Image (cartoon, helix red, strand yellow):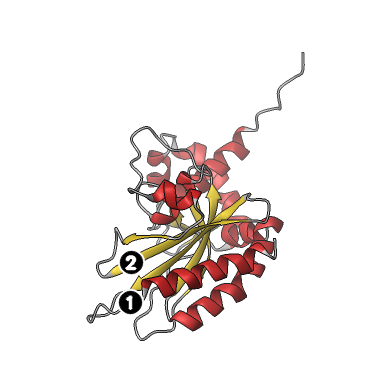
Amino acid sequence: MKKSVSHVPALARGLKILEWMAGREEPATLTHIAQGMSLGVPEVQRPLACLVETGYLRHLSSGAYILSGRLFAVANHHPPQLRLRRAAEPALLEFARNTGQSIHLSIPDGDAALMILDIPGEGLVRLSLQPGARFAPKDTLSGAILAAGGALPTPADLRLPKGLREAVRAKKPFHRQSQHVVGVVDLGLLLQDSDDRILGVLTASIVTPKSGAVNLPSLCNALERTAARLRETQ
């Protein structure tokens, strides 16, 4: 019988600490981390010290810990993601320059969409999102589009927006009012390569002016051109 891979408790604990910290926006003390992970303080002291020494965590003067940028930097040097980001950046910059609207690229990551590139719009009012953010299907259009395309798991209680599956099957953009910001319309399109493999999702955050004069068909066309340009590079 083939032996299972040896379990390394300290390594497993360190990885779990990183995952737990990644879900927080505020620094956490040693005691808070131990309580949050249902462990004793001695069990997290050494992994924390190692993560600080290797640069994945920062130990603040207040005594609390916070994630450094190292984890994000390592993830962004992953070759497939790096190639996609490099190819996508000029295309997304052109979209933002021509439309004045913000646009971001997200890829499937477990049960959520992981945003790997964000280009703010060039209008007077612009939106900017934090690279590395994760978008659940129930909370964001990016996640919902990936779920509708089969790139993310769809829980039984997930209700996708009406017409979204049909838009994804037809390879057309889909829009809806933002669930998080008043006056913003989210416009998304599943991104696929020439063999129809799912690469990710392009989502534009459209700021609606008081006049309400948003040319949605023109923005849909611009998003489709951006996706087509990216498809040719993959």
Farthest residue, direction bottom: 124
The residue closer to the viewer here, 188 or 10, is 188
Q: Are marks 2 and 1 in contact (CB under 8 Å)?
A: yes
Residue 133 shows in this picture? yes
Q: Does residue 17 lie above or below 226 as drawn?
A: above
Badge 2 density bin: few <14, some 14–19, many ≥20, Cα 10 Å: some
Which percent across, then down, holds residue 202?
A: 50, 62
Q: In which quarter of the image is the N terminus?
A: top right
Left of 195 or right of it: where is 113? left
Label 2, label 1: how many angstroms apart (C-alpha)? 10 Å
Which percent across, then down, holds residue 92?
A: 55, 73
Q: Does residue 196 lie above or below 41 as drawn?
A: below
Farthest residue, direction right: 1
The residue closer to the viewer here, 91 or 166, is 166
Task: Tell me the residue that label 1 is attached to.
Answer: 214
Which percent across, then down, holds residue 67?
A: 50, 58
2 or 1: mark nearer the eye: 1
Badge 1 density bin: few <14, some 14–19, many ≥20, Cα 10 Å: few
**Who's the residue at 43% across and 81% down the image?**
100
Which percent across, then down, holds residue 129?
A: 43, 67
Using the image, tell me which numbered label, if any, was put on residue 185.
2
Amino acid type at mark 1: Val
**Who's the residue at 56% across and 50% down the image?**
49
Residue 30 shows in this picture? no
* Lower position in the chain sequence, tag 2 or tag 1: 2
**Who's the residue at 45% across and 60% down the image?**
173
**Who's the residue at 50% across and 41% down the image?**
44
